């Protein structure tokens, strides 16, 4: 039997995917082991919790379940592998979310595809917390001064489609947290794979992502300098001394996610998309997420989703139902999309998310 160049290329792609699958499964096993060993009473003690805050109205409306089939700039946060399946050569996206406790989440992403090389993207996520009164041990009610916390994540993503069905992606996030006069910096890596037409089933997608892998973070800065009192100090005639508090280091909130999606066409203009995702993390209980989307003529979208944590202690998991919609219009080759999402939250006002996206 004669082996054609096309057959050799297909064989090479299959071997590459097998190797990637082995690496991905090794990462899954490693992170899952860490998660089960370190979880429990550690909720709320991780570094850089903003890495877990979702972005983008479309995927939030789907309950965050769209790991397997999210594409373009929408996919960067959920599964960087989906960036390679962008519908346009270049995309730009801005999203704002009214988060809990009057915190605002602003997110900007831009991406460009390079023929034969893959797709690159730059993202910036910032938390708007507002001004906070400065308090000290001597002035617990405030000193009259204020400070503004700054939490920022800057990410660079590379994604490439190995075949028309398989894509991979890697994101490097640089994290900065500044509170008054102390700062913590860190780096976190996300890796993802998407497989279209899984198990030879047309419309069935599968995705795997490992997120927030990196070294521990630790606060430092002049805000940790203290003036301490020394008892019975007679040798040099001093009664106080300057010292620096050593802040403890904290792990990143690492997660492993596995998702499935299925796309069904009712007719040439109407489609239904279903998605599901399982999330395992090292500081919180496991989560299950479900979502559904109604699409008409690739112009009008109605979405709904639900997230749950069955093993969580009663009333400690605050998220639940979500829904939203969107409109897409094309103006002489320029795609213009507006999306909205509503996410219910216990004990706080609901999250409202608005996203504007351009593709060209």
Image (cartoon, rainbow, N blue to C red):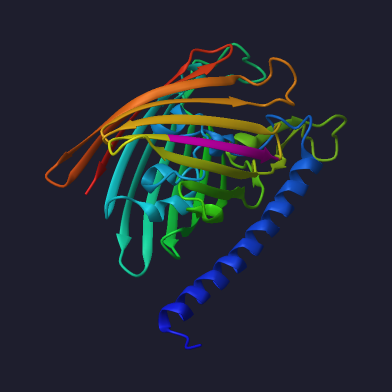
Q: How many marks?
A: 0
Residue 148 position (above or below residue 360): above
Q: Residue at x 30, y 67 (%)?
A: 115
Question: Does 277 lie within the magenta span?
Answer: yes
Horizontal and vertical percent position of residue 97: 41, 26
Residues in magenta? 273-281
| Residue projecting furthest to the front | 1
Which percent across, then down, holds residue 311? 74, 26
One can see residue 26 in this view: yes
Query: What is the x, y in percent for residue 150?
Result: 47, 34
**Above or below for 102 versus 244:** above
Query: Is residue 133 visible to the viewer in this orientation of the structure?
Result: no
Residue 197 inside the magenta-drawn segment = no
Residue visible at 54% across and 49% down in the picture:
207
Front residue of 113/328: it is 328
Residue 96 image-quadrant placement:
top left
Up the image or down, 60 lies above or below 5; here it is above
Residue extending furthest toward the bottom: 2
Q: Main secondary structure of the magenta part?
A: strand
- Residue nearest the observer in this picture, 203 or 39: 203
Residue occupying image coordinates x 33% and y 52%:
111
| Residue 347 position in % (x across, y down) | 58, 11
Residue at (71% x, 36% y) in the render? 283
Q: Nearer the viewer, residue 64 or 228?
A: 64
Query: Is 133 on the left or on the right of 57, as rendered?
Result: right
Tell which residue pokes out farthest to the left in this image: 332
């Amino acid at each position: 039997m004669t082996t054609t160049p096309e057959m050799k290329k297909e064989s090479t792609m299959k071997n590459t995917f097998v190797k990637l699958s082995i690496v991905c499964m090794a990462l899954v096993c490693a992170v899952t082991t860490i998660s089960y060993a370190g979880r429990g009473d550690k909720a709320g003690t991780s570094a850089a919790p903003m890495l877990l805050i979702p972005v983008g109205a479309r995927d939030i409306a789907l309950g965050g379940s769209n790991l397997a089939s999210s594409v373009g700039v929408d996919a960067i946060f959920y599964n960087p592998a989906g960036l390679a399946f962008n519908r346009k050569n270049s995309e730009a996206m801005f999203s704002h979310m009214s988060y809990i406790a009057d915190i605002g989440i602003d997110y900007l992403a831009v991406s460009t595809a390079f023929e034969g090389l893959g797709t690159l993207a730059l993202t910036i996520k910032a938390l708007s917390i507002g001004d906070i009164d400065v308090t000290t041990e001597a002035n617990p009610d405030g000193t009259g001064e204020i400070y503004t916390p700054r939490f920022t994540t800057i990410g660079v993503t590379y994604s490439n489609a190995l075949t028309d069905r398989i894509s991979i992606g890697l994101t490097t996030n640089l994290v900065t947290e500044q509170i008054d006069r102390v700062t913590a910096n860190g780096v976190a890596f996300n890796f993802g794979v998407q497989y279209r037409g899984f198990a030879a089933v047309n419309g069935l997608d599968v995705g795997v992502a490992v997120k927030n892998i990196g070294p521990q973070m630790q606060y430092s800065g002049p805000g940790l300098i203290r003036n301490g009192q020394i008892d019975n100090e007679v040798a040099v005639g001093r009664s106080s001394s300057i010292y620096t508090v050593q802040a403890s280091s904290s792990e990143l909130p690492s997660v492993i996610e596995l998702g499935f999606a299925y796309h069904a066409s009712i007719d040439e203009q109407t489609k239904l998309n279903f998605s599901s995702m399982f999330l395992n993390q090292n500081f919180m209980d496991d989560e299950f997420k479900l979502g559904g989307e109604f699409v008409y003529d690739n112009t009008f979208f109605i979405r709904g989703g639900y997230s749950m944590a069955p093993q969580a202690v009663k009333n400690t998991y605050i998220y639940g139902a979500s829904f939203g919609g969107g409109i897409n219009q094309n103006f002489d080759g320029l795609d213009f999309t507006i999306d909205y999402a509503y996410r219910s939250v216990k004990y706080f006002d609901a999250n409202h998310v608005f996203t504007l996206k351009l593709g060209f």
